[in-house]
Structures are given as structure tokens and as C-alpha cells.
Amino acid sequence: KNQVEQSPQSLIILEGKNCTLQCNYTVSPFSNLRWYKQDTGRGPVSLTIMTFSENTKSNGRYTATLDADTKQSSLHITASQLSDSASYICVVSEGSSNTGKLIFGQGTTLQVKP
Amino acid sequence: EAGVTQSPTHLIKTRGQQATLRCSPISGHTSVYWYQQALGLGLQFLLWYDEGEERNRGNFPPRFSGRQFPNYSSELNVNALELEDSALYLCASSQERGGRGYTFGSGTRLTVV
């Protein structure tokens, strides 16, 4: 069964600190892996998208890595800000067929405290 | 460029009623996807429309249905509402099958009382 699992489920850090969120997936084949940021009650906003041939992608203070061999991805947030408080969702796109369906992780809820 | 727009922002219905949610995709996007996100849970795939046709649906009962119009906007209809249908309903659109340019709207918060 195609699954995406994220850890930790929740995380609290102090403003200015770095943190890393993990994503393991069993989706195969897959065409791309995305990280989204979702503020409470809002729609997810794309942070990064990587194909299986890419192993790192940055977007400002956000850096995503991908190891397609071990089927693991991470999202590293540098110098966290209060506005980083949100849910971070790892999403994997099935690659072989036009299912139109993305496989979503449950998300990691990040709280940045002053 | 306008993003994916959803209406209404909030909707309160009574159990047993019907709810209609609307989504306008980004200009040039032909695929529309619907997701349900219950409070504290992950996104669950509901429906995918492309070029006016339903292409795939998730593991939801038939009372969840929808359609896509010639201008690529879409409606999600939920009949015989149940309390557990209370959730944030998100719409996303993309340029083509496979999801290039995949973008979410801000969602409709449906509350069933």
C-alpha cells in the first residue's frame, strides 16, 4: 500500500533555532515529492517540489532533501521565525498512471515560541 | 494572476441537508481536485475532474459527488449530511494530468450541526 509517514507528529522549538522534519514513503513508482506549509484553516502552500533525480531543493530558509534509494525526505528550517508555526505536509505523487491522486502524509505540526 | 478560489469560505448546515461547494481553478488549469481535511487529520482525496469528466474518486460514499463545468470550475455536492462530514474542504487545480502547477485554494469550512 502506498503510504507517506512523517515524523515527528508535533514539534516545539524556540525562535531562531533550526529544525528538521522527516518523511518516509513507500509510494512506488513516484514522479515527485513535495513539501507544503499549511497554516491553520488555510490551504496548503507549496514550499518545494523534487523529482526522483533531485536530492536537494531550497526555498529561502527551507531546504528539502530527497534520498530516492532509501525513500526518505527531510525538510530543514533554518533560523526559525514565529511565522513558521504551521503544519508541514509531505506529499508524494504516484508516477506510473494518471490517477490524479497525490499521497499525503499526516503532517508535522510545528510551533515556534518566542 | 488569481489563485484557486473557493466559495463559500464557511458553511453551516443541518444534518440531512445538502451542501454545495464551489471552486474556480487558476486560469489555464484544466484539472480540479477535491480533498477533505477533518480537524487534526491529513488530507483525504475525494475527487478528480479533468476536461469535464470525473477521472478518479477516493474512498467516499456516493453522496459525495460533483461536476466540472465547461469553464473548468467545479462543484462538490454532499447529500444527506452527517455530523462527521464537518471538515475543511480543499480544492486544488493543475495544468494537466500529473499535476504541473498544482495549487490549492483556501478551502471551505463546512460545519454540520
Image (cartoon, coloured by chain):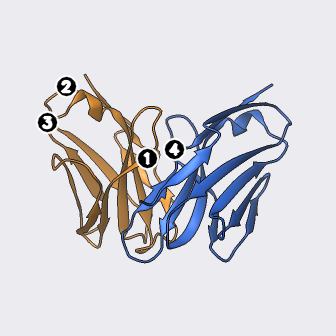
Chain colours: A blue, B orange
Front of the two marks 1 and 3:
1
Quadrant in the picture for residue A50: bottom right
Q: Residue drawn at (37%, 68%), measured in percent from left and top?
A: B31
Front of the two marks 4 and 3:
4
As measured in the structure, the alpha-carbon distance from the residue carrying label 1 to the one carrying label 3 is: 22 Å
Chain letter for the residue marked with disc 3 in the picture: B
As measured in the structure, the alpha-carbon distance from the residue carrying label 4 to the one carrying label 1 is: 8 Å
Q: Which of B1 and B82 is in front in this view?
A: B82
Q: Is mark 4 on a helix, strand or loop?
A: loop
Quadrant in the picture for residue B18: top left
Where does residue B36 sit, x and y in percent of width and height? 36, 44
Q: Do the residues labelled 2 and 3 touch (CB within 8 Å)?
A: no
Front of the two marks 2 and 4:
4
B26 vs A113: above or below: below
Quadrant in the picture for residue B19: top left
Q: What amino acid is at disc 4? A: Gln
Q: Name the residue under label 1.
A: B43
Chain letter for the residue marked with disc 4 in the picture: A
Q: What amino acid is at disc 3? A: Ala
Q: Residue drawn at (25%, 53%), measured in percent from left and top?
A: B75
Where does residue A67 sit, x and y in percent of width and height? 69, 66
Q: Mark 4 points at which residue?
A: A106
Say whether mark 3 and mark 2 are on the same chain.
yes
Residue B80, numbered label: 3
Q: Would residue A79 be found to the left or right of residue B24 on screen?
A: right
Q: Residue drawn at (65%, 39%), measured in percent from left and top?
A: A8
Q: What amino acid is at disc 1? A: Leu
